[in-house]
Amino acid sequence: MQTNLKWKKGLFSNCYSIYSNGQIIGKLNDNSFTQSANGELNGKRYNFKTKGFIKQKTQILEASSNKVIGEITFDNWMTKADITLLDKKAKLKYDNLWNTKWRIFNSEGLEIKFSGCSNGQIDSNTDDPLLLLSGLFVSNYYMQMTVIILVAIFIPIWTTISF
């Protein structure tokens, strides 16, 4: 099934809004302080809970039962991720240097293409809500990690500069 969706996220917002034909059909709300996110798409609800310090992984839970149904393992270079669900495995990979194009794919022909920065598009050959939300979650996770790394690098530099 071919799926074409749009998404929007404000610059300082913690919420992705997902649209089909101009109608909102889902959201992904991130809570950076608890390293978790809640997503809903087409009536299906999921929770993402990130654990660990150096080598972080995210558990994916079905919201209604709080049962673990998958896991996301992140790449150290913040360019790839492995998504393992109960019934399938997939990979996420960025397709350009600016990380504004990425895709989820597997050997069975699954392909979900994402594009954008603060708003964008999703073109997919599946309507699986969990995979569609996972693609936005991973991109958001890597964006947060990039900001944390930049702050960690530049705060010591800024504090040593005297005016």
Image (tube, rainbow, N blue to C red):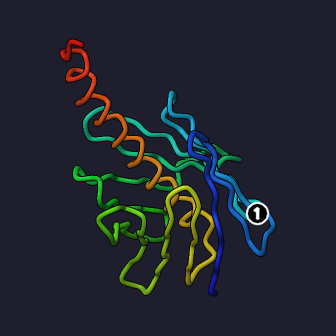
Within 10 Å of disc 1 (Cα), the crowding (few <14, some 14-19, many 20+) is some
Residue 65: percent from the left, percent from the top?
Answer: 67, 46
- The residue nearer to you, when weighing 143 against 25, is 143
Quadrant assignment for the C terminus:
top left
Horizontal relation, residue 110 to residue 24: left or right: left
**Mark 1 residue element:** strand
Residue 5 vertical placement versus 144 (above, below): below
Residue 156: percent from the left, percent from the top?
Answer: 21, 20
Q: Label 1 sits on what residue type?
A: Ile
Residue 120: percent from the left, percent from the top?
Answer: 57, 66
Horizontal relation, residue 146 to residue 28: left or right: left
Q: Kindly identify the residue that appears in the image at 24 percent across and 15 percent down.
A: 159
Total number of numbered discs in the rendering: 1
Q: Quadrant of residue 23?
A: bottom right
Q: Kindly identify the residue that appears in the image at 55 percent across and 55 percent down.
A: 118
Residue found farthest to the top = 162
Q: Quadrant of residue 54?
A: top left
Residue 70 vertical placement versus 132 (above, below): above
- The residue nearer to you, when weighing 115 against 124, is 115
Q: Kindly identify the residue that appears in the image at 57 percent across and 39 percent down.
A: 12
- The residue nearer to you, when weighing 135 against 95, is 95
Residue assigned mark 1: 25
Residue 88 vertical placement versus 64 (above, below): below
Residue 94: percent from the left, percent from the top?
Answer: 34, 66
Q: Kindly identify the residue that appears in the image at 44 percent across and 55 percent down.
A: 139
